[in-house]
Amino acid sequence: MKKVLAMILAVMLLVVAFAGCTAKDESKDVLTCGVTIFEKMNEKDANGNWTGFETEFAQAVGEIIGMEVEFQEIDWGQKYNELNSGAIDCVWNGFTANSSDDGVKRSDLVDFSYGYMLNQQCVVVKADNLDNFKSEADLAGKTACVEGGSAGASYAESVTDKDKIFSTPAQINAFTEVKSGAVDFIVVDILLAQNICGEADYADLAIVDAIELDSEIYAVGFKKGSELTAKVNAAIKELEANGKLMELAEKYGFENVLKVTETIE
């Protein structure tokens, strides 16, 4: 009888211990940010650690709202599925708020934080091919590469044939496609293009200044109805007020495009 009671007690202790561990895991405050490799925004250093303006921005927000910040690399075209499934808590990666996907406003698909940075799409071609792209009309019928589900993809579909547009999971990959001659042009965020075109392996690429697209604004995207939106907004305002946000922008060379705005339309 004593042996039976001892076994029952041991099992009960294991159940309690397991329940305690489970409760601890469930209460862990982690903000999982969905990202892609975006130079000076979200990228990995030589040790494999995430770095960049948006990386440090998210971490600073995490400190204020009391959450540990983790980064999860995603396929940009799957961002809404990742968000709605709960795989990530937000999309914090040069997410253009005042744009649309498949004719639907992004603000109807997610809840956006306050805007924090100005951007615009741009067209990139091989530098020795610049003379062939003097206006938007010159893009018609040409082959393009874009990040799937991006603002650049929407623009490309408006200027050339859809069957001539190739998609990639991340913007950074598009530069290789145009450099190799696989496509005639790419459409990417100008903040990224300015850091890449004319440098190192991409010295032979250039932004088509003759084609200027509409202004955009970056914001953090959350699942509809998320309580995190208001918390992050309050933290953004605090970082703006104490100067920390500008410090981060200056560190990565984005001080001229930093702009906190409560409206994203």
Image (tube, rainbow, N blue to C red):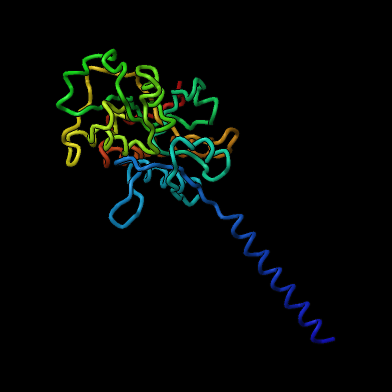
Taking depth in this image into account, of 159 and 63 the one nearest to the observer is 159
On screen, residue 198 versus residue 256, left or right, reads left
Residue located at (19% from left, 41% from top): 201
In percent of width and height, residue 137 lies at 28, 12
Residue located at (27% from left, 26% from top): 185
Taking depth in this image into account, of 159 and 55 the one nearest to the observer is 159
On screen, residue 74 versus residue 118, left or right, reads right
Residue located at (74% from left, 72% from top): 12
Taking depth in this image into account, of 140 and 63 the one nearest to the observer is 140
On screen, residue 261 versus residue 143, left or right, reads right
Count how many numbered circles sit on residues in the image.
Answer: 0
Q: Is residue 19 above or below residue 108?
A: below
Residue most toward the left? 128
* The N terminus - image quarter: bottom right
* The C terminus - image quarter: top left
Q: Quadrant of residue 193?
A: top left
On screen, residue 202 versus residue 37, left or right, reads left
In percent of width and height, residue 242 lies at 37, 39
In percent of width and height, residue 139 lies at 29, 18
Residue most toward the bottom? 2
In percent of width and height, residue 86 lies at 57, 43
